[in-house]
Amino acid sequence: MRARSLVFVALAVLALSGCGYNSLQQQDETVKASWSEVVNQYQRRADLIPNLVQVVKGYANQEQQVLIGVTEARAKQAGSIQLTPELLNNPDAFAKFQAVQAQLGASLKSLFAVAEAYPDLKSNENFRDLQVQLEGTENRITYARQKYIEAVQGFNTTARALPNLLTAKLFDFQVKPSFTVANEPTIAAPPTVDFGPESPPAGAGSPPTGAAPGAATGPAAAPAPSAPQSTPK
């Protein structure tokens, strides 16, 4: 009886391996690990923001609109979305998460742009240190997002291929959402190049040196045909 059970288990394992279950399971864990790193880097950015706001207040307290915008964007990140692995199975929640992060990133850019008008703030050691840390965090976010995108691409490719597709449906391995580029139609459009009105080349329109006033400056005219000469008879 025990031998039959072992044989049944072995056959079940072979069947699951052949239908892609193991690959789906491994790649699902890779996606979750990549997602955790994305969340970790976004959280690192959020943790630096309160200190940055306090430093800027000391030099540019009148920039309340920008300061409040950064603070509210950070609060929205912290309170509106539960950053759990289950978020990866909810495309709408994932899109909301991405929108909140994009809003926070835009608010930070506005804050640093305002700082350009305050030399004392720009030279402050704490401000410079926070700016360097945030710039480094942005680079880490970019890298973490790229690793997540690659992990999701691998998982989704496996989950959509037969016979893995049937296994994915049976064990509820859902296709994962990925990050998208903001303003994708605008980015995809070819740039418009405008050099303005064409200016004439240097010297155009003025007679060459030594030419008599009123002399033609365009291409040389073809010589006039000579009068036909009579042939002596």
Image: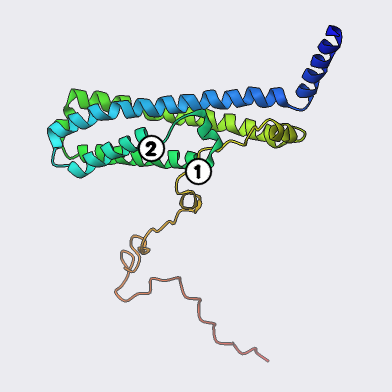
The residue that mark 2 highlights is 80
Q: Is residue 122 visible?
A: no
Along the line of sight, which residue is nearer the eye, 162 or 215? Answer: 162
Please determine whether, in this image, residue 202 is positioned above or below residue 69.
Answer: below
Colour setup of the view? rainbow
Point out residue 8 in the picture as x, y percentages from the top left corner: 83, 16
What amino acid is at disc 2?
Ser
- Identified by mark 1, the residue type is Asp
Residue found at x 14% / y 38% = 61
Most foreground residue, 83 or 49: 83
Determine whether 77 is above or below 211 in the image. Answer: above
Give the residue displayed 31% in from the left and 72% down from the top: 212
Q: Are marks 1 and 2 in contact (CB under 8 Å)?
A: no
Q: Which residue is mark 1?
A: 92
Picture residue at 36% right of the left edge, 25% below the top: 44
Q: Secondary structure at mark 1?
A: helix
For the C terminus, the quadrant is: bottom right
